[in-house]
Image (cartoon, rainbow, N blue to C red):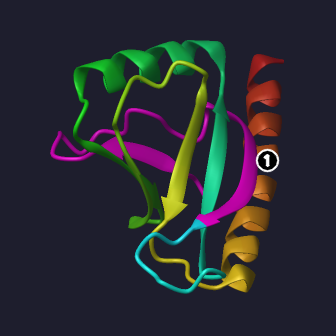
């Protein structure tokens, strides 16, 4: 599971990839499309390294009004509308295709494990 981030309407080149992420958290947010007060959507918050956070800040400044897509295995699984510059190095995505808590947790666990392996891969390459 190698997460990649693409800018809506741009060339099919990721602006962030699996090597840019340093941490991952999961949470839930109110589903604003539902009248049910306990209806929740799930979201992933990706932490970025310093270089990637700077790059993301520049991209979001230039592309306010567009959306970022979180793509895993060729499928868009999350969306982040760019409303302002992201300056804190944390990129949240509402999971667009994952409706159940069980599926959201399974995706989170698989991504967490994948990011651990990617970090180990980077350490091995550096020596």
Q: Residue at x 74, y 25 (%)?
A: 125
Q: Is residue 15 magenta?
A: yes
Per the image, the residue denoted by label 1 is 117
Q: Position of residue 35 (x, y in %)?
A: 48, 84
Quarter of the rendering containing residue 109: bottom right
Q: Quadrant of the C terminus?
A: top right
Q: Which residues are magenta?
A: 1-29
Residue 2 against residue 52 in the figure, above or below: below
Q: Is residue 46 left or right of residue 66?
A: right
Q: Nearer the viewer, residue 108 or 87?
A: 87
Q: Nearer the viewer, residue 100 or 7?
A: 100
Q: Residue at x 23, y 41 (%)?
A: 66
Q: Residue at x 22, y 38 (%)?
A: 65
Q: Position of residue 64 (x, y in %)?
A: 25, 31
Q: Secondary structure at mark 1?
A: helix
Q: Is residue 25 left or right of residue 18?
A: right
Q: Is residue 102 left or right of residue 3?
A: right
Residue 67 against residue 50 in the figure, above or below: below
Q: Residue at x 78, y 36 (%)?
A: 119
Residue 85 against residue 2 in the figure, above or below: above
Q: Is residue 78 magenta?
A: no
Mark 1 nearby-residue class (10 Å; few <14, some 14–19, many ≥20)? few
Q: Position of residue 94 (x, y in %)?
A: 51, 60
Quarter of the rendering containing residue 15: top left
Q: What is the total number of numbered labels drawn onto the structure image?
A: 1
Q: Nearer the viewer, residue 1 or 55?
A: 55
């Amino acid at each position: 599971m190698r997460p990649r981030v693409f800018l809506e309407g741009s060339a099919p080149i990721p602006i962030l990839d699996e090597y840019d992420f340093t941490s991952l958290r999961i949470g839930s947010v109110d589903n604003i499309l539902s009248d049910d007060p306990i209806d929740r959507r799930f979201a992933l918050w990706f932490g970025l390294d310093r270089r990637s956070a700077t790059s993301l800040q520049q991209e979001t400044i230039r592309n306010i009004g567009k959306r970022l897509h979180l793509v895993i295995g060729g499928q868009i699984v999350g969306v982040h509308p760019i409303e302002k510059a992201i300056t804190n190095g944390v990129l949240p995505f509402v999971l667009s295709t994952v409706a159940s808590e069980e599926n959201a947790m399974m995706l989170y666990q698989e991504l967490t494990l994948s990011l651990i392996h990617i970090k180990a891969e980077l350490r091995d390459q550096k020596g």
